[in-house]
Image: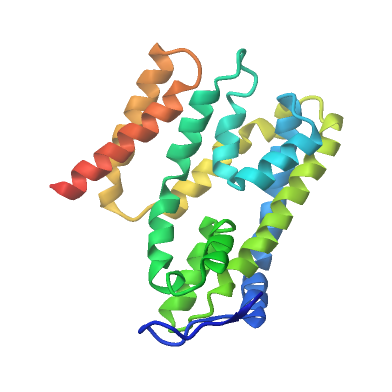
Amino acid sequence: MLQENTSGTEGRITFTLAGAFAGARRCFPIAISGCGIGLVFGTLAGQAGLGAGEAALMSALVFSGAAQFVVLGFWTSSPLPVATIVLTTLVVGLRHVLMGAALGPVFSKLPRREAYGSVFFMADENWALTMGEFAKGRRDAAFLLGGGLLMFLAWTGSTFAGGALGGAVEDPARWGLDFAFTAVFLALIAGMWKGRSNILPWTVAAAVAVAAQHFLPGQWYILLGGLAGSFAGVVRRAL
């Protein structure tokens, strides 16, 4: 139930239906664009052997487009590398630890049901918009939930649609769908660029990934590149 919470020392914190609708309105253009990526993911998931319902269930449980595109590369392996999939998903999602910590000053004042229920629907886009709201002095924490719910429905629905209609696309490469994974991460990289401080960890990650792809079988280069880049980032901050 959406309600008001005025505890704490950082101002009046609320969790209202109006805040949830405001978050949904702000995230509407993002949700529309997310439908396009969801259609692509559903189509590629079908090509990897997943049914439309299975692809939609993955989207509902994981709700992480970046991780899902990565994991799709493992799906045709036999036997299924479960441990690698779990570790890769963890590495891709580690940024959510920092994102959640940034929400802490406000969300720690909420009841656990509201706080934990909201952060399940946290994605890069609605998190960034919510932090922008907080920076303006607004403290309606339901803003994150409203935007996240809309994005969740758009993502799972478009994934199902892509899986259901994807059988009509016999050759994804003909339509450029095989480039979807690369395009998604190029867009993520462009949005994540913060300046020269990114050069070292990104260079290390790229070098390790290329070397691992050349010398190791399977998709280990994704995991090893991510770990190497993360370690390089920690070292750079410590210096």
Residue 183 lies in quadrant: top right
Q: Where is residue 13 in the image (x, y as percent from the top left)?
A: 48, 82
Residue at x-position 40% and y-position 67%:
104
Q: In this view, does 51 lie to the left or right of 33?
A: right
Residue 232 lies in quadrant: top left
Q: Residue furthest left?
A: 239
Residue at x-position 67% and y-position 65%:
29
Nearest the viewer among 86 and 181 is 86
Q: Can see residue 233?
A: yes
Count the labels in the image.
Answer: 0
Q: Where is residue 81 in the image (x, y as percent from the top left)?
A: 55, 20
Q: Is residue 230 left or right of residue 28?
A: left
Q: Is residue 50 left or right of residue 16?
A: right
Vertically, is 119 above or below 18?
A: above
Residue at x-position 57% and y-position 63%:
118
Q: Where is residue 217 in the image (x, y as percent from the top left)?
A: 47, 12
Vertically, is 79 above or below 33?
A: above
Q: In this view, does 65 lie to the left or right of 107?
A: right
Q: Can see residue 200?
A: no
